[in-house]
Amino acid sequence: VDRPNLQGRLETLKVHTRKIRLSEDVDLKKLAQATAGAVGADLANLVNEAALRAVRNGRKMVTQEDLLAAFDTVTMGSEKKNARSTEIEKRMTAYHEVGHALVAALGKNTMPVSKITIIPRTGGSGGATMYIPEEDKNLYTREDLLAWIHSLLGGRAAEEVVFGTMTTGASNDLQRATAMARDMIARYGMSRELGLLSPTVITNQYLDGQSSLDCSQELAAQVDKAARALLEECYAFDRQLLTENRALLDEISEYLLAKETITGDELMTFVNADKEEKETPAEIEE
Ligand code: ZN
C-alpha cells in the first residue's frame, strides 16, 4: 500500500474533518506533518477518535490536542490509565526508551526522534520512541539501515549498561533488528559474507512481505552467522556509546521519568547542551 505524502495526508484530513467542528487552534497542515507514515484509514480513524475524545471531555469542538492524542491512540492503542507498574519497571522502561533515542540522536545518520513516552498503552507497549519518517524517501542507503539497527538495539544496550540485566521489553526490537540484518545480508547484497548474492524470496508481497531463503543449507547457515555478527557488532558499539554518554543518558531518563512524555526537541536540547559543554575548552588555570 502506498502511503500518502504530506499533501495527500492534508487533503485526506480536510475531507474527514469536514463534518466535525474544529476549534480555532486546529492546524491541519501541522497535523499532516505529524502523521507521516499514516495511511488513509489511519487518518479516518484518527479524526473519529479525536471527535470521541472531545465528547468524552465535554467539549463541542475538536482541538489540535484531541487530534494529536488520537494519532497516538490509533498508532499505539489508548493509554492504560490504571496500569500499575513498579518503580523499577518504570525506570527500566525510561532508560530503555532513552537508549533508543540517544543512540539515534548521537549517530551520524540522524534519525530524528519525534517523541518518547513511558505511558503504557493498550496495544501492549510499556513505552515507545517515535521517529519522524523522512518524507518521500523510497531509497535507503546501507548507512540508513545500520542507523536503524543501532537505534533498535539501543534499548537493550541501555538495560545492560545501566541495570546489568536484560528485559523482555526488547523482544520486538530484536525481531525487527534481526529481520533488517538478514535483509541487508541476504536481500540487499550489503555484506562481506554473501557479497552480491541475494537468495531472499518475498513470498507474500501484499500481506506483510514475508520472505524466505531460496538457497542451500550451508548458505542459509552463513546468512545466520553473518546476521548474528552484524547485530553483535552494532550492539557492542551501542553499549560503548551509552557507556561513554552515561551522564547524558541519566539526565534525559530522569527527565522522562518526571514528565512521562517528551518531544524530540526536548531530547535534542539535552544532546546539544552536552555537545557544547564538551566542545568548550576548559579554562586554563594560571
Ligand atoms: Zn524498545
Image: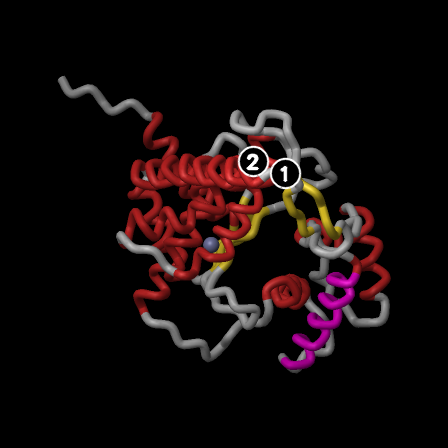
- Please tell me which residue is depicted at 41% across the width and 57% down the height of the picture: 256
Above or below: residue 35 compared with residue 110: below
Tell me the residue that label 2 is attached to: 219
| Tag 2–tag 1 contact (CB < 8 Å) | yes
- Say what amino acid the circle numbered 1 marks: Cys
Instruction: Name the one closer to the observer, 51 or 128.
Output: 128
- Please tell me which residue is depicted at 47% across the width and 66% down the height of the picture: 119
> Is residue 214 at least partly visible in the picture?
yes
Tell me the residue that label 1 is attached to: 215
Residue 31 is situated, as x and y percent measured from the top left of the image, at: 70, 55
Q: Residues within 10 Å of mark 1 (few under 14, many from 20)?
A: few
Name the secondary structure under disc 1: loop
Query: Is the magenta region chiefly helix, strand or loop?
Result: helix
Residue 177 is situated, as x and y percent measured from the top left of the image, at: 52, 46
Which stretch is magenta?
Answer: 41-56
Q: Relative to residue 61, is residue 185 drawn left or right? A: left
